[in-house]
Each structure stands twice: as structure tokens, then as C-alpha cells.
Image: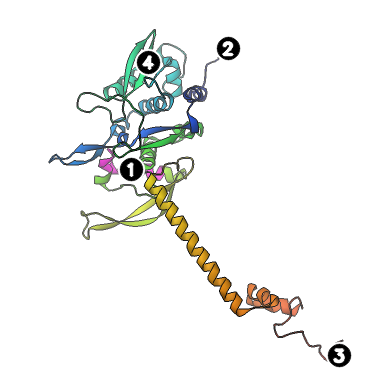
Amino acid sequence: MGERVMTQEESIEYLLRRSQRKGDTFPIRREFIQARVEGRLGEPTTGPGPLSDLLRAPHALELLLLVYAVTTGSDFGVTERSQLWGRAAGIYLLADRKASMAVSRQWQHLEKLGLIERRQHGRLKRIIKRRECGLVGESSEAYTVPTGAKGDVYFRVPFAYWREGWHQKLDMPGKAVLLAAMSRRRETFTLPQDTRGARALGLSRHTVTRGIDELLSHELLVKTGTDEVLNVRTKRGYEWVNTYQLAKPFNINLSNSEIKRLKAERIEIERAEDERLEAKYQTLKEVELTVEEVELLALGGNARRKARGRGRLRRPGGPRQASPGQPG
């Protein structure tokens, strides 16, 4: 019988606990999904972030997300054996030297994108995360904690992504759309399903559609209705698009402006309800219904007649008169 080896779940849980993050979430800048770039005429616009370069490298994406979750301070680096990384990312589950080669190829891919840096640390490699925008020109930027200010917007990913098994349940289209949806930071949002909108995320229209369908089937995404948005490429300049909401555990990202909007909306609903109840109370005061009349009004027509027939309720006009031959 062979020696016991850590499972993928045990390896992931070890790394997550190692991070000692409060709230069991970790931040990712929005620029990982959608970056600010220069247009053809030099004007600022949006374009795909590094996520688009990882759509065909699922193991590299899993490694990167684990690095984002684990690294919290100092040089934002982490040193662990290749076998541990290989098991956690589902690359190679055996405890032999092949794990080092398999994991090294994924680190190399991430390093070429400017998302990590590798440094020798004794006999092991120390993995240091770089800023989420990846390569800018020919270099990448050192990582700093995101502030949430304009131009430094971030969203949070819950550890439940691993602990509830979504890293295994979702395919790459579902994972890409899930990250894009969380980066919206709104309670209700739209997702681009036209070719131009999908390309801005570095995704094909087919990938976005598959990702949305996948999240809907897992009930992580809920269709809430439709909204009319500007689209100058249509004949009338507007089009109707579906609106969505994220379900638990991924509905945790709201911008400050969205929080204020929802708070104001809730206050307005409560004020309207107070006014409705006050108006109803004033109406009841004016009518001055008896207890029996209130009970009768609460019943439907048939139920009201049956209640009278059984004598449970008196008629509004007063006591019921005795019929001939019956005791008064």
C-alpha cells in the first residue's frame, strides 16, 4: 500500500488557511478583466485584460487565483513545493518529480504575461504576484494593495469558489463570465453578448453566451428582466438586453455609489409604505367599522355567506331574528 498523499481539497484548504485573510475573500483589480487602453486615434478606451490570455490555460488561471488568495503582505510572495501547487490546481496529483515540470510550465506562462515573478528561494521557487494589468509595454508593475479609488477599482472573490467546488464544476466560459459579472459591482447588471461588447472583454460572443448559460444552469446567475440600452450599431440606436443578478456566494461586490443608490431606493420604498398604511388607517377611522364588519370584509363572498349561515358572524344590521317555531 502506497504512502498517503494530500488530496486536492486538502492542498487548497492548506493554502487558504495560510493566507489568514479576514472575511475569507481576496481582491482582484478590474483591470484583470477589462483594461484601459488607447484606441486607434490615441483616445482612451477599454480593451481585454490578461484574463483573455488565460482562457485556454485553465491550470494557469487556477494557480494565479490561488496566488492572489494566499499572498497578503511583505513582498506579496509565497514559497511552496511544486507538488503542493500541482495538487491544488489539479495539474498533477502524484508526489513525484513530474509535478515540478508540469507546474513550471504554468508559472512560465504567467510570468510571460507579467502577472507573477519567480525568484529562487533556497531549493524552492518564491512566487511573487505582480499588478493585475500584466505587461504594460515590456514590463509589469509591482503589486500594491488596491484602494478602490477611480482607476484602481477592484472586486472580491470568496473562498467559497474552492470550498463549494466551483473551481471543478465550472468550465472556462463559466469562470470567465463569473469574474466579469463580479467586476460589475452592481446588484443588477447587463453582460455584453454582442460581438463588439464581448471582444472588449477579450471573449468571443459564443464564449460569453456559453458562460451565461452555464451560470444560469448552476443558479449562480439569475435573469431579472430586460433593459433598454444605447447601441448606435442598431437601426434605432437602442436595443433591449437581459439584466442579471449574481446569487450567493458571489453576490458580495457593490460599489459605494451602488450602495448609496440601494439605500435611497429602500428609504423611498419604506416612505411610500408608511404613507400607504397611514392613508389606510385614516380611511378605517372614517368608516368606523364594527368588529363583525371587519371580519366579514376579510372573507371572500362564499366564505362570508357560509360564516353567516353557521351563525359564527352576526349580520351587520344587528342580532339575528328568531324564525316562527324557534325559541326567541
Q: Is residue 262 left or right of residue 203?
A: right
Question: Circle 2 — which element?
Answer: loop
Mark 2 vs 3: CB contact within 8 A: no
Question: Circle 1 — which element?
Answer: helix
Can residue 187 be seen from the camera position used here?
Answer: no
Task: Point out the stretch of residues depicted in magenta.
Answer: 198-214
Gap between marks 1 and 2, in whole Å?
A: 46 Å
- Asked which quadrant contains residue 217, the reply is top left
**Which label's residue is closer to the chain start, 1 or 2?**
2
- Residue carrying label 3: 325
Between circles 1 and 2, the one closer to the viewer is 1
Question: Circle 4 — which element?
Answer: strand
Q: Is residue 42 left or right of residue 89?
A: left
Gap between marks 1 and 3, in whole Å?
A: 82 Å
Can residue 127 be seen from the camera position used here?
Answer: yes
**Which label's residue is closer to the chain start, 2 or 4?**
2
- Residue carrying label 4: 126
Instruction: Bin the neighbour count of mark 3 within 10 Å (Cα to Cα): few under 14, some 14-19, many 20 and up.
Output: few
Gap between marks 4 and 3, in whole Å?
A: 103 Å
